[in-house]
Image (cartoon, rainbow, N blue to C red):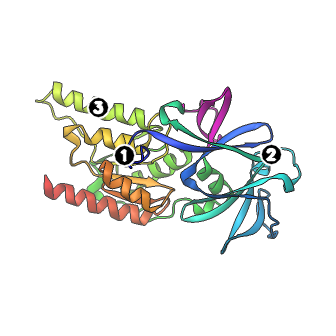
Amino acid sequence: MEDILITGKNEIEIILFHVNDKNYAINVSKVREILNFIPYTRIPLTPPAVLGMIKSRDDVLPLISLRKYFNEPEEKEENSKIIITDFFNMKIGFLVDGVQKLFRVGWQQIQPPPEIGDNSVAIGIIKVEDKIIHMIDFEKIVIDINPLLAFKGDDSMVKEYKNKKVCIAEDSKTTRKLLEDHLKNKGFNKVSSFADGKKTLDYFREIAKNIGENSQENIEIPDILITDIEMPLMDGYTLIKNIREISVYQNLPIIIFSSISTPEIHYKKDIVGADAHITKYELDNLDSLIKLLLLKKAKES
């Protein structure tokens, strides 16, 4: 039976958890397992939020306390739960006070958070059973703790990119800024970026509408789209599916740029019509893909 989460139905499964009296959520695609508290081995000279290392099955991985990261008062760790995540091609444990339940919601139910500064880790707000749930930017948390995991790539300029137009769809403010800066350093001087899939689709639809209404004018179409999967209002799969249904974008190069890397993503990528998938933050591989896809597009034009 076809899973409705596979083909751009704009839905997500989330796991609800709490820290102190605050409710949070994580995409189930990032979660490998949930454990009762297990002892950890402290590591010297690590940031306060990094409690130490734990062993889960055959893996040894870092354990991050969200209480410490959020500067919440300490509680007995023995009553806590550990959420084992898998993103950035690495496994990390997050210590939380408790895990509540699994929910399936539409991305349209996840609203962008208010602009409350660059340090916010909320990427979406959900109302579930009279509760306010914050979708957390786990990528930002990990980069805050270990900045070395952020982009490392060759920033040398490519002169052929000067007049190319690139569009970014990425809800994480941290990732969006890093990606914008890298692409501008590479030579793209026309970079448009959006924090959710809906705004991105509106942008592409407006361009297509202008082309239809002004067929004699030279209207610039984006040369490439780089999109995340997890975004408020509309996820990346639904965005790509809708863009591919617009005739002028049949040959638009589309790259999925996500912290999640699973076999299912490659399957879903093909169903909705993306050209490639790359894991954050593999910038050298991203640069190679951009070059390859732009060359392919030029030969087909």
Q: Which residue is mark 3?
A: 205
Label 3 crowd (10 A; few <14 / some 14-19 / many >=20): some
For badge 2, the amino acid type reads Asn
For the point 49% across and 35% down, which residue is it? 106
Of marks 1 and 3, the one in the foreground: 1
Image coordinates for residue 28, horizontal then vertical, percent? 57, 50
Q: CA distance from mark 3 to mark 2?
A: 43 Å
Q: Which residue is mark 1?
A: 7
For badge 1, the amino acid type reads Thr
For the point 60% across and 29% down, which residue is it? 114
Which of 142 and 263 lies nearest the eye of the viewer?
263
Image disc number at residue 260: none
Q: Is residue 171 above or below residue 28?
A: above
Q: Quadrant of residue 185?
A: bottom left
Pointer 3 with pointer 2, Cβ within 8 A: no
Q: Secondary structure at mark 2?
A: loop
Q: Which residues are magenta?
A: 111-136
Q: Secondary structure at mark 1?
A: loop
Residue at the outermost bottom position: 58
Pointer 1 with pointer 3, Cβ within 8 A: no
Q: Is residue 78 left or right of residue 104?
A: right
Give the mark nearer the N terminus: 1 vs 3: 1
Give the mark nearer the N terminus: 1 vs 2: 1
Q: CA distance from mark 1 to mark 2?
A: 40 Å
